[in-house]
Image (cartoon, grey):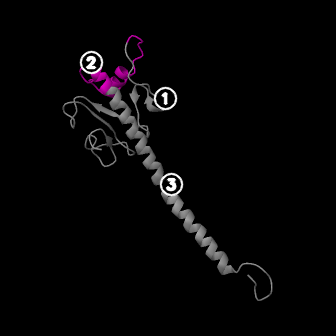
Amino acid sequence: MTLQTGKNGFTFTELLVVISIILVITASVLTVIPRLSRDTQVKVARTMIDRLEMAIEHYYDDNRFYPSGDIENLRSLLQSSDTTFKQYIEFNDEETSGNTIIDVWGNSLVYISPGNQNTSSYDLYSTGPDGTSTTTGSDIDDINNWSR
């Protein structure tokens, strides 16, 4: 663009418009990224629960009963360190902490057998990103095996 002085360049208004457009695009991207990250974490937690459900069902097929106890007992039954027992699942280091199975947020998964929701089998759930559950797995952010 030619200025009245005869020099080539951008006017101050044009620079402000370009900067405004860049700011709007940046703000849009920065608001979408955290939501995508949370959605990915929820999918990872759901996948972990699905894997555990398959292992529990294989255990049931072999033994005709579901593992009893809590999440620590479940881990020891599904991933036996004794080579004479069948191993139903193998956990990555990021999926365990001590003797418990943890979700993507580092919270221990909850296993109840017989279940409160699934009275003929078991309840399995993650307490979600906040790490708390006031209604035994039915909070809005909890990821469980009875409501899909």
Which is nearer the N-term, disc 3 or disc 1? 3
Badge 1 amino acid: Asp
Q: Say left or right for 44 vs 53.
A: right
Which is nearer the N-term, disc 3 or disc 2? 3
As drawn, the residue found furthest toward the left would be: 119
- The residue indicated by pointer 2 is 63
9 shown above or below 86: below
- Residue shown at 63% from the left, 76% from the top: 16
As drawn, the residue found furthest toward the bottom would be: 4
Image coords of residue 81 (percent x, y)? 42, 16
Determine if residue 136 is in view.
Answer: yes
Q: Say left or right for 78 vs 22.
A: left
- Residue shown at 50% from the left, 54% from the top: 33
Q: In the rendered structure, are the residues bearing label 2 and label 1 in contact, judged by CB atoms less than 8 Å apart? A: no
Quadrant of res 113: top left
Marks 3 and 2 sit apart, C-alpha to C-alpha, by: 45 Å
Q: Nearer the viewer, residue 76 or 87?
A: 87
Q: In the rendered structure, are the residues bearing label 3 and label 1 in contact, judged by CB atoms less than 8 Å apart? A: no
**Which numbered disc, 2 or 1, marks the residue closer to the eye?**
2
- The residue indicated by pointer 3 is 33
User: Dot 1: what SS?
Assistant: helix
Which is nearer the N-term, disc 2 or disc 1? 2
17 shown above or below 52: below
User: Dot 2: what SS?
Assistant: helix
Q: Which residues are magenta?
A: 57-84
User: Dot 3: what SS?
Assistant: helix
**Which numbered disc, 3 or 2, marks the residue closer to the eye?**
2
